[in-house]
Image (cartoon, rainbow, N blue to C red):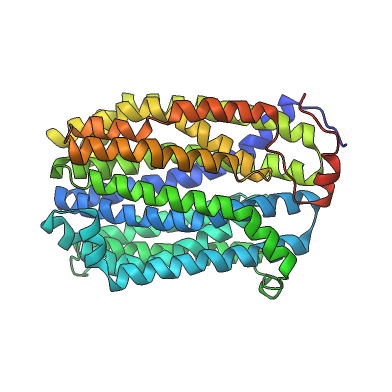
Amino acid sequence: MRKTDFSWGDFLPRVAVIAIPVALQNLMTTTGSMIDTMMIASLGQQQVGAVGLCAQFSSLMFSGYWGFVGGGMMFFSQYWGAGDDDGINRSYGLTLTCMMTVGLAFGLMAVAFPEWIMRLYTDKEAIRMIGKEYLKIVGFSYPLTVLSMAMASLLRCTERIRIPLFGSAAAVVTNISLNWILIFGHLGFPALGVRGAALATVIAQAANILVVAFLAWRSRHPYLLAVKRHFRWDGILIRAYFTKCFPIIMNEVMIGLGNMVINIVLGRQPEEAIAAVAVFRTLEGLIIGFFAGFSNASSILVGKEVGAGYIDLAYARAWRLIYLCQGFIGAMCGLLLLLHTPILTMMGMKGGSFRIAFGFLCIYAVAALIRMGNWTQNDTFRAAGDAAYGTILEIVFMWLMVIPCVWTAGMILHLPTLLVFACCYVDEPIRYVLMQVHLFRGKWIKPVTAEGKKAMLGWKPR
């Protein structure tokens, strides 16, 4: 068994090198979404609500492909730690194929059946018509979004963190500039309203991909553009891949469907509440952006050492990453509450919608501290090879506890929107305790590499 002593002096700079660029990338993306919302808010609260509901359909797509991202990152990071170039290339090709299948399917649904999608999410006719026009265009961005996410996942796991950051910067600048031109009709272009925002999103995603591909080619990244080596699969790899990924895929699909049910309930609240939900989801992205930095750090810093056979070091890093994540998330939520008045006002919230949006933030500030701890633990388990434990807990609690509570509160008892929203987080404290017990037992370390499997012989957590 290979051992390496834990050192804070080595650990914190490694976390920073990974987490800060990822957090900055997500911060830029969220800032772009906030500016989008501010621009669309000038058109009216119905437009804000419609685009927000369309974003929930995008979130369902995210759930469809994120299982492959989580599984892929487990393979990328462990093969990276073991120095297995062929393993990285082939697992990336398989991950990309699965992800693009999801992206193309959702893009087709958005373009061909926008009316059906909007009817599912809300019973407000005016909001449905606006969302229909937006979806018909933004659906073309879905395969591009999925491709950029696959590229970013591979680059991060092979410690080329800055390339996706530059790609996101190009996308945000492009999106904001084209929003200004196309939404309001500047520089001689027609004023397209929400259709202009959708078109800007499509072009921005294309810019992201072009910048990332160019920088990967310029830096001679050995994997991203090695297309001929991506699709040399065999039965052993495919079985191993889907065996490890299946729990993650099921987790994301079932949670995505559960979130769809929650969004259906929220989409039948008053119009000011629907607009407040749209703004909240944008601000939630700010918190999740910082979480994503620690999530990627867990996948890389833990998965890499598991793959290389340094089990003690992986274990020592895991629980420290989780508590660091919770500390930063707590600070971010506090800052968001302090600045809520100017932020919500700039995003078009006033009167009832302002009060509801602020209520969402207060509830989320408490829930996020526990929720992000759960998410980071689950991502850490997945990176180390255990895709089942967190998945089972999340699915069981979502469908047996959260969904019944939300549906009963919103559709049967017709309770106030804030109480319905609070029901979305009733399971988090219970799952956190169960996840902590599993974390310190160390049974989540399940390597996929020969080096890692050999190191596990006789290993016990210290």
Tell whether 125 sits left or right of 148: left
Q: Quadrant of residue 193?
A: bottom left
**249 w.r.t. 424: above or below:** below
Q: Residue visible at 22% across and 70% down?
A: 189
- Depth check: give the residue in front, 339 or 438: 438
Q: Residue visible at 38% across and 68% down?
A: 107
Q: Quadrant of residue 200?
A: bottom left
Quadrant containing the N terminus in the rendered view:
top right
Q: Is residue 44 visible?
A: no
Tell whether 220 sits left or right of 183: right
Q: Picture coordinates of residue 188 (x, y %)?
A: 21, 70
- Depth check: give the residue in front, 266 or 126: 266
**232 w.r.t. 424: above or below:** below
Q: Picture coordinates of residue 6 (x, y %)?
A: 77, 27
- Depth check: give the residue in front, 225 or 251: 251
- Residue at the right extreme? 1
Tell whether 295 sits left or right of 383: left
Q: Is residue 388 visible?
A: yes
Q: Picture coordinates of residue 460 (x, y %)?
A: 79, 29
Q: Residue visible at 57% across and 26% down?
A: 323
Tell whether 212 sits left or right of 224: left
